Image (cartoon, rainbow, N blue to C red):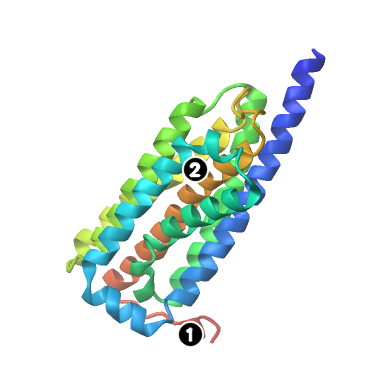
Amino acid sequence: MDESVGAEKQTRRLLLKTYKVTILMLIIGQIQVSIFMEIKPVKKFLEEHYYVSLVQFFISFISIQLYVFFYHIIVHKPVWKRVLVGVWTFEVNTISIMKPAKTAPYVSFIVSFVLTFAIMGISLCYGNLAVNHRRGLFISRHNVIRWSERLFVLTSFGIIVCSEMKRVTIEFPTLLIYTILSNIFVVVFAASMRKRNFYHFEPPGDHILIGQLYYLNFYALYMGYVWTTASGFQLMGWNISIGELFK
């Protein structure tokens, strides 16, 4: 009984750390997108060289696969090596789907920011309800990691491809589907993290791996919101600016 209570407390502690890692990464990622979209030479270069986004996507895909596969080795390395690998993985995955955001209106960023954290709150509440009632959208740790990688790759590739579409009538519903899938999965992820024995207590630092993966799915969700709302505004013919919202 004491061991079960101790494991539950440790799981809650790691869960809190996981959300801290995810939120910190998400805020940094959102700030980077906002800054990156203002660098006009980079924007022009990426618009003229579409293949660069695909190369970035490929590097992102390989990086997250290697990070997850070798994490049990990485966690035992010196701090500076762990930080270097973590920052590299974070940056290549963040940058890989930045390109579409550089043509989105600022209103899309504001709406997406609010929606993303609203969904995070809903996911947290659902996870608490699911674990209390011992029922819900639970899947194993292995499947969470596997589908986390797959869905991020699918959403990233979909956003990159949709950004080059000329017909907004096809682009908007396609992006909407990707965004709905991301919405569902972050809720599943939140509930699954509350499962008993989801976290590995040894070696330490398991919350960083889970937080990184959870961030990837929330960042993909955020970018999905950004581009879906931008496409929706274009489809409806709405030219909305921040100034007009406060008039």
First in sequence: mark 1 vs mark 2: 2
Instruction: Provide residue 70's location: percent of width, then percent of height.
Output: 48, 37
Circle 1 or circle 2, nearest the eye: 2
Residue 197, label in figure: none
What amino acid type is highlighted by mark number 1?
Glu
In the depicted structure, whether residue 148 falls above or below residue 218: above
Instruction: Provide residue 183's location: percent of width, then percent of height.
Output: 45, 46
Q: Residue placed at 57% from the left, 64% from the top?
A: 28
In the depicted structure, whether residue 106 falls above or below residue 244: above
What amino acid type is highlighted by mark number 2?
Val
Locate residue 175: give its quadrant: bottom left
Q: Nearer the viewer, residue 146 or 244?
A: 146
Residue at mark 2: 186
Residue at mark 1: 244
Locate residue 135: give its quadrant: top right
Q: Is residue 11 left or right of residue 52?
A: right
